[in-house]
Image (tube, rainbow, N blue to C red):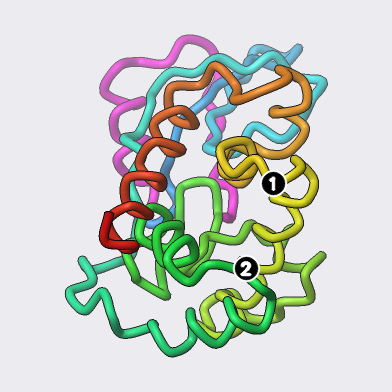
Amino acid sequence: MPANTHMLRGAVPALALLLILTALPGDVAADIYKYEDETGIIHLTNVPTDATKKYTLIMREPRVIFNRKIARDINKFDPLITKSAQKHGMDPALIKAVIKAESNFNHQAVSPKGARGLMQLMPATASSLQVDDSFHPEKNIDGGVRYLRYLIRLFNGDLRLALAAYNAGEKAVMRYGGIPPYRETQDYVQRVLSYLNGYRGK
């Protein structure tokens, strides 16, 4: 996701701040942070990437998927899901549940953090999986299936931990020795498992 940064000197008037925040394009504006440099200039950005700066969160954007329409055909990608699941020895119902939770079957979905496609692959993850086009349904599904299979094996078949790692990262799961205490991740795991039971007909 491209960063948007604005600079203001001194105090930020409420009206000026509002104008800047609303000027950010809808497809990239997520959480907004600020920091003040040594010259007194206030910087506003939606991507706090500089570890040397002390950022302050000043506006939180609702966690939604941008640039998408609600998918209506939940069976559209079943052939691709089944093909990839069989190829990699995975449960098609699980893959479908993850896709439902991640993108609601919209292959053009982009998250506020930059995750893309049906299985919401981050650019770095997609690159490591050699997925050159995350918006290509078949490539995205195949990459996501391989990544999920890796996580399941990493956590010795514990699906809950694998799903938590898919959402929050494997390092977070290892750090906490279980599902991280993040409401988003805890809700995500329960949501996927609920979808999984539904797709299995349980």
Say which quarter of the image contains residue 97: bottom left
Numbered tag placed on residue 157 in the rendering = 1
- Asked if the magenta segment contains residue 21, the reply would be yes
Q: Residue at x 58, y 76 (%)?
A: 85
Q: What amino acid is found at the position of numbered circle 1 in the picture?
A: Gly
Disc 2 crowd, CA 10 A, few/some/many (<14, 14-19, 20+): many
Viewport quadrant of the C terminus: bottom left
Q: Secondary structure at mark 1?
A: loop
Q: Which residue is mark 2?
A: 145
Where are the magenta residues, as a range? 1-25
Total labels drawn = 2
Q: Is residue 192 above or below residue 7?
A: below
Q: What amino acid is found at the position of numbered circle 2 in the picture?
A: Val
Q: Toward the viewer: 31 or 103?
A: 103
Q: Is residue 153 left or right of residue 190?
A: right
Q: Toward the viewer: 94 or 72?
A: 94
Q: Nearer the viewer, mark 1 or mark 2?
A: 1
Q: Is residue 69 left or right of residue 193?
A: left
Give the spatial CA distance, label 1 vs label 2. Answer: 15 Å
Disc 1 crowd, CA 10 A, few/some/many (<14, 14-19, 20+): few
Residue 20 seen from this side? no
Q: Toward the viewer: 181 or 40?
A: 181
Mark found first going from the N terminus, 1 or 2: 2
Residue 107 seen from this side? yes
**Residue 78 percent across, percent down from the top left:** 38, 83
Q: Is residue 177 left or right of residue 67?
A: right
Q: Residue at x 53, y 29 (%)?
A: 44
Q: Secondary structure at mark 2?
A: helix
Q: Residue at x 38, y 83 (%)?
A: 77
Q: Is residue 54 above or below residue 94?
A: above
